[in-house]
Amino acid sequence: MKTVLITGANKGIGREVAGQLARKGFHVFVAARNPDAGRKAADEIAKQSGKATFIEVDVTDNASVKAAAREFSKIADHLDVLVNNAGIMMDGDDAILEVSDNIFRRTIETNVLGALRATRAFTPLLVKSKAPRVINVSSSGGQLTGGADGWSPAYCISKTALNGVTSQLAAALPKFAVNSVCPGWVRTDMGGRNATRSLEEGADTIVWLASEAPQGLTGKFLRDRKEIPW
């Protein structure tokens, strides 16, 4: 059975990806900081569509990430897919000349270093897969092409940096498929009710990369299953 671990999988896009991959026959590891919400999501997925296990992890805490990898290794001997989905957009992240150092640090800590920490900790399990894959959930707000449009600068810059992490990991892990994904503006707690995309639409490319995309597709930034400019 293929295995996938998804950070921030208790709600939103992560929860949708987890449910879809469970229906495709994956053993889904629902990784979340909140134990109650994470266990509830894993239980719901297991009842509805397949095999799901909760793993507690706070991606801002290196010890927590390492502990999650140890916990995972007690249950499964390899990891096929890691989806770095956990991310934050903070109140007060409104203007580049006004955003506080604290907001900037916390956003980078979660959105960039969190993904790198998780990848670093789970690489020993990923290398045991026949086709290891790492998927970083990014945003078109991180694109340098075309210039910034001024919204949530700390968040957008964190996604630019996350794309840099993707590029570096793809070079460092040549047998892996490592890619960034822009899910689009999705109706989640972060995206809000006015967002133009459903959870299913937001999850589609992530699920495709996890399950069907060619293993040779790596070091790319994708939306709607197609490469987009960095």
Image (cartoon, rainbow, N blue to C red):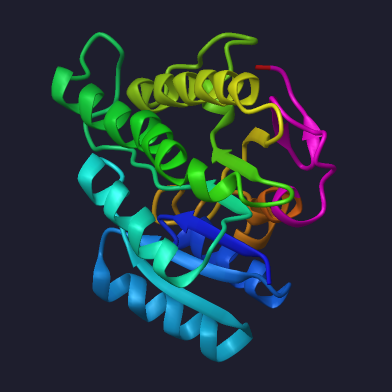
Q: Give left or right: position of 228 versus 145.
A: right
- Residue 213 pos. (x, y %): 82, 46
Which residue shows up at 57% across the image and 43% down it?
A: 185
Residue 230 lies, with reference to residue 194, above or below; the image says above
**115 sits left or right of 64 in the view:** right
Quadrant location of the N terminus in the rendered image: bottom right
Q: Observer-nearest residue: 190 or 133?
A: 133
Asked whether 124 or 151 is in front, the reply is 124
Report the number of discs: 0
Q: In the image, is residue 71 part of the stretch drawn in magenta?
A: no
The question of residue 226 being in magenta is answered with yes
| Vertical side of 140 occupied by 115: above or below | below
Q: Is residue 58 visible?
A: no
- Read off the magenta span: 209-229
Image quarter hosting the C terminus:
top right
Residue 38: horizontal and vertical position, in percent? 35, 70
Q: What residue is rendered at 25% in x and 64% in y?
A: 34
Q: Is residue 152 left or right of residue 185?
A: left
Looking at the image, the residue that sits furthest to the bottom is 47
Residue 141 is situated, as x and y percent measured from the top left of the image, at 52, 25
> Can you say whether 35 is above or below 134 in the image?
below
Residue 28 appears in the rendering? yes
User: Residue 194, position in %: x, y?
Assistant: 51, 51
Instruction: Give the residue drawn at x 51%, y 77%.
Output: 52
In the image, what residue occupies the spot 85% across and 42% down?
214
